[in-house]
Image (cartoon, coloured by chain):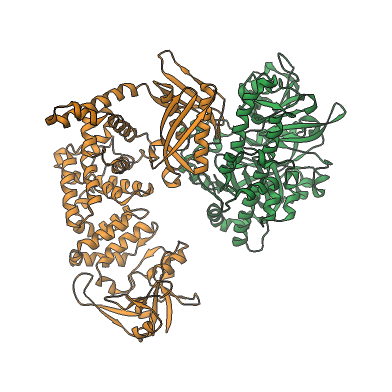
């Protein structure tokens, strides 16, 4: 992007003063190199978001922002319901509550090395991945509703994991206000046999080695030790979330004119939070959040089973579980006044700083773990929320690397088989049902996650704690 | 009396492969003991019994001695004094000569575990040579256990069996049975390579053996050697999980190249007719089932024409479709096209090149089928009905080709996701094409068989919303049914869309699905006509 369009607030903060129909400024957090490479569409989309009714403070874009639907991916915006604020299905995204969780194994990379192939094969055999795959569970109507209401808590009640897991999940594993009745039959039909599946695209289950500790105090609290291995799971609410996103986007497109909302872009479709559609969407979206939490909890159980077979006696403990595509009701201090806001994070991670009352006692004094996923072959990071970040973008940070290249370009540049062999040469084992899928997700098709994390750290959104390197990647 | 699980079940369990059926050996029992326990006698030549509840096979421990030519001349000795070790000794390979007792303890007197670890097929004893079928069995195992090799001494023994002419005494049905099973394994080429290594290929299938060393033009065949090409083709067919007739057709399509006079090298003009002759003779000789033979004959005769399908005149296309009976037997036509595609892809570098011929021929068939044959027949001179129908079909294909130039689909880039676009002479045609573009995000639409039809209806206030609704309705059906669709028919009635989508269940091996589609979006959404009046429909899909 052209830097002259911005007012440079600091090395890593770029501001666009309101113009046209913008109600608030737009702010992008990124270093100069990242912002130069960013798609012009991010500028257009973040300024469009700033025009929506009831938006508070500013429309934000994270260092990994890229061209999304209506909202940029890597976008954060908060709305006040009492000031005509809106909720937007596009502002949450299709894969509602897609997110990452990371588990501590206590096993060193050295100890894993001789069993890596076996672990990779077993994980690939036991964790359903890819198009058309189904899970072990078949939910009937009442089980479906219980899952949508209970989230990870429901999964724990079914025997997938324990109470201790819930402490380490946003919303304590169960999003309040979920209304299964607002979820269509079509959405439930798409989900019937998809609980406990990874999905495809950029979703994965990885074994990662902690290769660098960057903040020893926080690392100790998160139980991260150099040389040890963690398991990270990246996936979302599967077909149910996609269908809810699709259906409410259409309803909001149709209804917006009736609410007097002028849409610069159909994908920005939204409805007042207090409107029937707004309330209905929030109920359905929260149910989808629970679906994603339950899904990650069941997959966690599958990974634990495999580890127990290969390393009898080990227990994988959950470090944290974050969601990337959400709209959450949160209290934030804006201009000295505490306000209840509906914070949309679209491809952005909640990153609460120390002292936040929603954090569990074991983390409250240090801050929330912020898990940043790489792409197969590249590093992932664990960060921690900061006090200053709470006032920057409503306690939000980046979520991943973001694509630098389209899928089409990627398949022209890489061959799946050659990539798998090349990564194996670097000690990274890939298991995937689709070689074309692997080529489309080539590490080179993504931006440099290290640069993104560095910018988030420098902007104070979150602080770096540890760097992780992949050892095994089960790719959907 | 002691009972053991023996053979393949023990081997497969040690390899971590799924165990399908278990064979048992009973030591220290007489047939009378077995009958008293309620076992059902079934063996004609050997004392074999079925368990009264599980119906699994239990054989009394036995030894065998050869007493004639071929695989039938054996003297069997079964008695309570035959030991387990003696029974295991008569088996073919060390990896198949292990047993497991009731407590799960392994009995491995001949080094089966060692050879499993060394991934080696090694014969148990010199008695191996007594049954020439074993040459075929070992070759078939090579196709299944793709990283195992035949021990040099075992290969030498196999060569002796061949040299003594023992292999020539095998009954044709038995040869076909082994070959058919081997073709259905993971890498059938390995079976033919083992047969070639021991000299059996030249004796059993001289027409296949001859293909090795025959050159083809390198610009179309980077592998050059015809035998190597055929091996690549059958392995490709196996990777696609296709049926036995398709695999047999893949194996035999180029037989004619082995008898082309050297002055015809490397182009082999006219090899198709010679292939047909040889396929017929081979099928006759080893009693190939009619279904396999007929498909193989059709593929041998027509594969050259299929590769040039896009250049053929409408009349030639209709003749081809009539010769392969596509109008009456559409499923066999699908098999025929699949075999031709295996031929196309069985060349280094052609694995993921576009091969439009199958779709093109299916569309030509659809256009030709659309004529009202009854009406044409009623109008025609009764003596010339065939010609009249041929004429009408040819005209229909010609019309479809003229219109087809205006109909296609494409992808366009979007940073994280994918843009899909359809172009056609009507809005309905553009909607059909954009649906194909969407399938192509996941897999090659040509690889999706039209096994099941799904009806779809949607309604929207404008064409753009209707497009998004149409694609989202398809996405819902794909996701909820775990299906992919490869053919679409759209009928528009004002703002109401009625459609049929044909497809099949997702098959990871066959379709290699790249990514799941989450939803169709309003990004880059456009529906309209271009300057030349063609309809265009497009949007971005979220993956």
Compared with A285, A82 (above or below) is above
* Relative side of B108 to B224, left or right: right
- Residue A321, image x, y percentages: 70, 45
Image coordinates of residue A277 in percent, x first then y, are 68, 30
> Quarter of the image holding residue B117?
bottom left
Residue A327 position in % (x across, y down):
71, 34
Q: Is residue B5 above or below residue B231?
A: below
Would you identify the image quadrant in which residue B319 lies? top left
Question: Which residue lies most toward the front here?
Answer: B378
Question: Furthest-bottom residue in view?
Answer: B81
* Side of B232 relative to A404 (left or right): left
Side (left or right) of B468 relative to B299:
right
At x 34%, y 61%, the residue is B141
Give left or right: position of B213 versus A202: left
Residue B222 sits above or below residue A474 on the image: above
As rendered, which of A88 and B126 lies closer to the eye? A88
Quadrant (top left/top right/bottom left/bottom right) for the C terminus of chain B: top right
The residue located at (20%, 37%) in the rendering is: B267
Residue A43 visible in the picture: no
Judging by colour alone, the chain drawn in green in this rendered image is A
- From the image, state the color of chain B: orange
Residue A306 occupies which quadrant of the picture?
Answer: bottom right
Q: Position of residue B387 (x, y in %)?
A: 16, 29
Q: Nearer the viewer, residue A307 or B125?
A: A307
Number of marks present in the image shown: 0
Quarter of the N terminus of chain B within the rendering: bottom left
């Amino acid at each position: 992007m052209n830097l002259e369009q911005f007012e440079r607030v600091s090395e890593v903060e770029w501001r666009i003063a309101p113009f046209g129909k913008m109600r608030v400024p737009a702010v992008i957090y990124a270093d100069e190199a990242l912002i130069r490479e960013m798609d012009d569409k991010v500028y257009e989309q973040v300024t469009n978001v700033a025009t929506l009714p009831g938006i508070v403070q500013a429309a934000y874009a994270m260092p990994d922002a890229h061209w999304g639907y209506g909202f940029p991916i890597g976008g954060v915006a908060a709305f006040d319901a009492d000031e005509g604020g809106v909720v937007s299905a596009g502002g949450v995204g299709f894969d509602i509550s897609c997110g990452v969780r990371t588990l501590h194994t206590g096993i060193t990379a050295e100890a894993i090395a001789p069993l890596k192939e076996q672990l990779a094969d077993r994980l690939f055999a036991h964790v359903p991945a890819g198009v058309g795959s189904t899970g072990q569970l078949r939910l009937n109507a009442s089980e479906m509703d219980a899952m949508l209401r209970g989230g990870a808590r429901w999964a724990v009640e079914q025997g997938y994991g324990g109470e201790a897991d819930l402490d380490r999940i946003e919303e304590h594993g169960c999003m309040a206000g979920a209304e299964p009745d607002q979820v269509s039959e079509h959405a439930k039909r798409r989900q019937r046999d998809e609980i406990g599946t990874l999905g495809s695209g950029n979703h994965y289950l990885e074994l990662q080695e902690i290769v660098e500790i960057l903040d020893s105090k926080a690392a100790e609290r998160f139980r991260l030790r150099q040389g040890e291995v963690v398991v990270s799971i990246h996936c979302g609410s599967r077909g149910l979330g996609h269908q809810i996103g699709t259906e409410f986007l259409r309803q909001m497109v149709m209804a917006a004119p009736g609410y007097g909302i002028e849409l610069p872009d159909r994908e920005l479709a939204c409805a007042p939070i207090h409107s029937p559609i707004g309330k209905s969407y929030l109920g359905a979206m929260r149910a989808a959040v629970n679906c994603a939490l339950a899904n990650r909890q069941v997959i966690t159980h599958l990974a634990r089973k495999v580890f127990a077979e290969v390393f009898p006696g080990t227990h994988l403990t959950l470090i944290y579980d974050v969601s990337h595509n959400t709209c959450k009701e949160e209290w934030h201090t804006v201009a000295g006044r505490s306000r209840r806001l509906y914070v949309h994070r679209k491809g952005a991670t909640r990153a609460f700083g120390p002292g936040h009352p929603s954090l569990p006692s074991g983390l409250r004094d240090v801050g929330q773990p912020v898990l940043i996923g790489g792409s197969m072959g590249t590093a992932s990071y664990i960060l921690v929320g900061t006090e200053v970040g709470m006032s920057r973008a409503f306690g939000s940070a980046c979520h991943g690397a973001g694509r630098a290249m389209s899928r089409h370009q990627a398949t022209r540049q890489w061959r799946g088989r050659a990539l798998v062999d090349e990564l194996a040469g670097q000690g990274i084992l890939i298991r995937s049902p689709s070689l074309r899928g692997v080529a489309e997700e080539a590490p080179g098709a993504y931006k440099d996650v290290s640069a993104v994390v560095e910018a988030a750290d420098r902007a104070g959104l979150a602080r770096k704690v540890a760097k992780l390197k992949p050892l095994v990647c089960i790719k959907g | 009396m002691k009972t053991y699980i023996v053979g393949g079940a023990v081997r497969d369990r040690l390899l971590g492969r799924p165990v399908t059926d278990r064979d048992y050996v009973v030591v220290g029992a007489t047939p009378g003991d077995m009958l008293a326990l309620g076992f059902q006698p079934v063996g004609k030549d050997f004392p074999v019994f079925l368990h009264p509840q599980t119906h699994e096979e239990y054989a009394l421990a036995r030894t065998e001695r050869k007493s004639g030519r071929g695989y039938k001349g054996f003297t069997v000795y079964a008695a309570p004094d035959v030991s387990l070790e003696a029974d295991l000794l008569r088996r073919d390979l060390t990896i198949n000569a292990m047993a497991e007792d009731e407590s799960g303890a392994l009995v491995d007197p001949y080094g089966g575990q060692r050879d499993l670890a060394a991934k080696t097929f090694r014969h148990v004893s010199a008695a191996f040579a007594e049954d020439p079928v074993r040459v075929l069995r070992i070759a078939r195992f090579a196709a299944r256990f793709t990283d195992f090799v035949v021990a040099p001494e075992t290969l030498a023994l196999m060569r002796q069996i061949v040299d003594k002419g023992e292999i020539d005494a095998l009954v044709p049905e038995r040869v076909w049975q082994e070959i058919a099973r081997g073709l259905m394994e993971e890498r059938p080429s390995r079976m033919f390579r083992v047969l070639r290594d021991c000299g059996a290929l030249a004796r059993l299938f001289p027409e296949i053996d001859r293909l090795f060393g025959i050159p083809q033009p390198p610009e179309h065949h980077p592998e050059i050697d015809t035998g190597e090409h055929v091996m690549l083709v059958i392995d490709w067919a196996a990777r696609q999980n296709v049926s036995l007739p398709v695999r047999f057709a893949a194996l035999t399509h180029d037989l004619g190249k082995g008898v082309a006079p050297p002055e015809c090298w490397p182009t082999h003009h006219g090899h198709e007719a010679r292939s047909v002759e040889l396929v017929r003779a081979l099928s006759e000789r080893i009693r190939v089932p009619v279904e396999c033979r007929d498909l193989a004959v059709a593929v041998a005769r027509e594969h050259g024409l299929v590769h040039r399908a896009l250049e053929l005149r409408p009349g030639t296309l209709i003749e081809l479709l009539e010769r392969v009976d596509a109008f009456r037997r559409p499923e066999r036509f699908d098999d025929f096209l699949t075999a031709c595609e295996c031929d196309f892809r069985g060349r280094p570098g052609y694995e993921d090149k576009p091969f439009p011929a199958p779709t093109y021929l299916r569309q030509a068939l659809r256009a030709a089928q659309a004529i009202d044959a009854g009406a044409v027949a009623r109008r025609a001179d009764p003596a010339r009905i065939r010609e009249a129908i041929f004429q009408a079909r040819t005209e229909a294909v010609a019309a479809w080709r003229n219109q087809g130039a205006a109909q296609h689909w494409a992808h366009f880039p979007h940073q994280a996701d994918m843009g899909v676009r359809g172009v056609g002479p009507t809005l309905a045609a553009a909607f059909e094409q954009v649906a194909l573009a969407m399938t192509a995000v996941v897999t090659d639409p040509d690889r999706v068989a039209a096994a099941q039809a799904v009806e779809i209806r949607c309604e929207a206030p404008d064409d753009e919303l209707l497009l998004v609704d149409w694609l989202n309705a398809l996405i819902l059906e794909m996701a909820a049914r775990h299906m992919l669709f490869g053919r679409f028919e759209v009928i528009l009635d004002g703002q109401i869309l009625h459609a049929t989508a044909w497809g099949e269940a997702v098959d990871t091996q066959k379709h290699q699905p790249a990514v799941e589609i989450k939803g169709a979006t309003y990004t880059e959404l456009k529906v309209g006509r271009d300057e030349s009046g063609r309809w265009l429909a497009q949007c971005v899909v979220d993956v």
